[in-house]
Image (cartoon, rainbow, N blue to C red):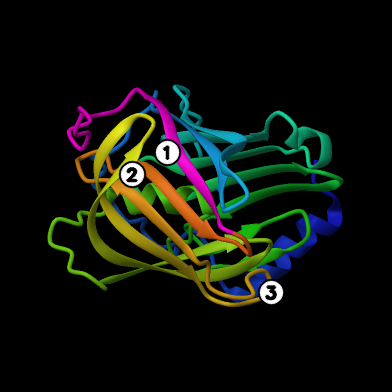
Amino acid sequence: MKSPITYFAIVLYLSFCGVNMVTAQELRKVDNEVFQRGEVTKYRVYYDSWLTSGLTAGTGTISVLEDNKKFHGRDTYHVVVNARSVGLFNLFFKVRDRFESFIDEEAIIPWSFIRRTREGSYRKNEDIFFNQFENYAESQKKIISVPPNVQDIISAFYYMRTIDFSDAEVNDEYTIEFLLDDSVYISRIIYLGKEVVETRLGRFRCLKFKPMVAQGEVFDEPYPMILWVSDDKNRVPILGSSAVIIGSIKLELIKIEGLRHPMKARLD
């Protein structure tokens, strides 16, 4: 149950903004022919450097669950991300992270975002509720004004998958606004062309991207990351690589099930 102070803050915020259901914006409609309920992808996280090669540090699983919780009477995709350290890494930096997003089925925008971070001694619990009709979000700490169709970090990824890149040209840019830690950020995703990558699951034809974020309170500089996504109707992330001080950290697809379309990007 929310405290009286929280209810007062909400009423005060809406009064100043002058928003009501009469003037609420109409939500967009996104054509999703890419993912579906039941899709599960699993990744391994490993280091590559002159000291070690392919040393697995952890695993991550992304699941689009079969349930359908409704928000404002609207259907949603319930996406859950679990990340955990493995082996010796549990001894000096244990990771047990869980993120959830309830994503509007038609607009591909979030209604609720849940974060449970357990990384070593660090703990972070976050629950955010979005009002996409009236452009605000409520966290445990405050109410935040947000732009139309704002994303969380999970729904942003699924929205990008719905974009048709068939006519994309090298260096084309795509922008997404997302909410994280009570602040709104703008991410730029740069298309770098097509490339074949090799993984434990085989070789894949991929679209290559460079995600970058605006500098701010959380991000000191744009992420030095490259992401390869399957060049087919699924547009599933196959490989990710981010530079570190020594070598790189990589994210590699190791298992997939429940795809909406056959994996035609796989070459062997």
Q: Residue at x 20, y 38 (%)?
A: 265
Q: Which residue is mark 1?
A: 74
Q: Position of residue 88 (x, y in %)?
A: 75, 32
Label 2 packing within 10 angstroms: few (<14), some (14-19), many (20+): some
Q: Position of residue 193 (x, y in %)?
A: 22, 62
Question: 10 or 252: which is nearer to us?
Answer: 252
Q: Earlier in the sequence, mark 3 or mark 1?
A: 1
Helix, strand or loop for disc 1: loop
Q: Earlier in the sequence, mark 2 or mark 1?
A: 1
Q: Do the residues bearing badges 3 and 1 touch, measured as CB atoms within 8 Å?
A: no
Q: Residue at x 30, y 32 (%)?
A: 202
The answer to whether residue 252 of the structure is visible from this angle is yes
Label 1 packing within 10 angstroms: few (<14), some (14-19), many (20+): some
Q: Which residue is mark 2?
A: 106
Question: 229 or 57: which is nearer to us?
Answer: 57
Q: Is residue 160 magenta?
A: no
Amino acid identity at mark 3: Glu
Left/right placement of residue 250 relative to residue 117 reads: left
Left/right placement of residue 259 relative to residue 86 reads: left
Estimate the spatial distance between the alpha carbons at disc 2 and disc 3, rounded to whole Å: 32 Å
Helix, strand or loop for disc 2: loop
Helix, strand or loop for disc 3: loop
Left/right placement of residue 17 relative to residue 119 reads: left
Q: Earlier in the sequence, mark 2 or mark 3?
A: 2
Question: 46 or 168: which is nearer to us?
Answer: 46
Q: What stretch of residues is rendered in magenta?
A: 247-268
Q: Which residue is mark 3?
A: 217
The answer to whether residue 82 of the structure is visible from this angle is no
Q: Do the residues bearing badges 2 and 1 touch, measured as CB atoms within 8 Å?
A: yes
Estimate the spatial distance between the alpha carbons at disc 3 and disc 1, rounded to whole Å: 34 Å
Estimate the spatial distance between the alpha carbons at disc 2 and disc 1, rounded to whole Å: 8 Å
